[in-house]
Every structure is written in structure tokens, then in C-alpha cells.
Image (spheres, rainbow, N blue to C red):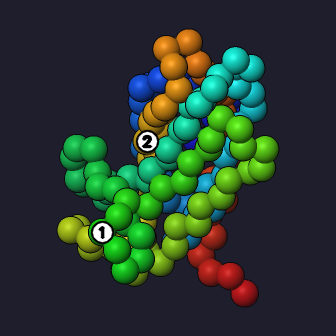
Amino acid sequence: MQIPGRRFMKDDKVLTDWMPRGGDNVILRGDRVSSNPSASAGITVTIRVFTKNNDETGDGIAVQQSGSSTALSFTVDYNDTTVQELVVNSVATTTSSNPKGLKQMLRLELVATGGGDDDWTEIRLFSPIFFNAAS
């Protein structure tokens, strides 16, 4: 699920394909490659993680922050110069109504907000890093 570079315009929305979970935990990383130089406010891309089991249909459910009902996400802003990172862990805390970790499959939703009609930003996502436990 690597995205080597994709240009986002205002209000763009992209869903990646479903992929099998390769471990109980995953590190997701993304950064801005470039933006149009005339952007005053610029485009911000928010990336959320969705999860479901193999036998479930539909769009899955957004993974939530631990101790919260807020969807787990990270953003790549039009003027970011560093790699943004998100760690999703603890598959054991996942329930159907309140997912705090990963089920059997996951995918990402990328939504662009802000900026003007002619503004754009290009981001890339690195391959996810799956692992079972840190030692």
C-alpha cells in the first residue's frame, strides 16, 4: 500500500485497497513531496485507518484513539518538511463498535481539505511496517 506520490486538490478523497494485516501493530509514514508555490493556505491531507475482518462486508470502521471515540488519523500539511508517522497497535483491544487496534484487514482514507481551487499538494506514503511486539 505504498503511494510513491499523488497530487491532491481541494476536496479530493482516496480510499486505498484492502490489505491483510501483517502483524498486530503497524507504523504508517507519509510526507509532502511538493506543493504549488502560490498556495496561501494550502492543502492538508488527513489520513485515517479503517479495519474489518475478512468475512465482513462494507467499508469497515475507523480505528479510534485509545480512550477516545475520535478516529485515529495523521495529517500531511502543505508546508510540512518532515515525515509524519502514525503507530496503530494492540489488536487485542479491537471490538466491533469501538476499534482501538487492527482487525484482519486495513485500508487508508486520504481526504484533502483547505486551500483554493487551484491549490495542490503532492504527498507520498511509505510501505507500512508491521510487527507483533517491540522487544
Please indicate, yes or no, whether residue 6 appears anywhere in the rendered image: no
Residue at 34 percent across and 56 percent down: it is 62
The answer to which quarter of the image holds residue 76 is top right
Disc number placed over residue 129 in the picture, else none: none
Please indicate, yes or no, whether residue 133 appears anywhere in the rendered image: yes
The answer to which quarter of the image holds residue 33 is top right
Amino acid type at mark 2: Glu
Q: Hey, which residue is sitting farthest bottom in the picture?
A: 135
Taking 71 as reference, is 75 above or below it? Answer: above
Q: Which residue is mark 2?
A: 109
Frontmost residue, 52 versus 65: 65
Dots 1 and 2: beta carbons under 8 Å?
Answer: no
Taking 17 as reference, is 91 above or below it? Answer: below
Residue at 74 percent across and 20 percent down: it is 37
x and y, in percent, of residue 134 in the image: 68, 82
Amino acid type at mark 1: Ser
Residue count near mark 1 (Cα–Cα under 10 Å), binned few <14, some 14–19, many ≥20: few
Q: Secondary structure at mark 1?
A: loop
Q: Is residue 69 left or right of residue 118?
A: left
x and y, in percent, of residue 31 in the image: 70, 43
Of callouts 1 and 2, which one flags the residue occurring earlier in the amino acid sequence?
Answer: 1
Q: Which residue is mark 1?
A: 69
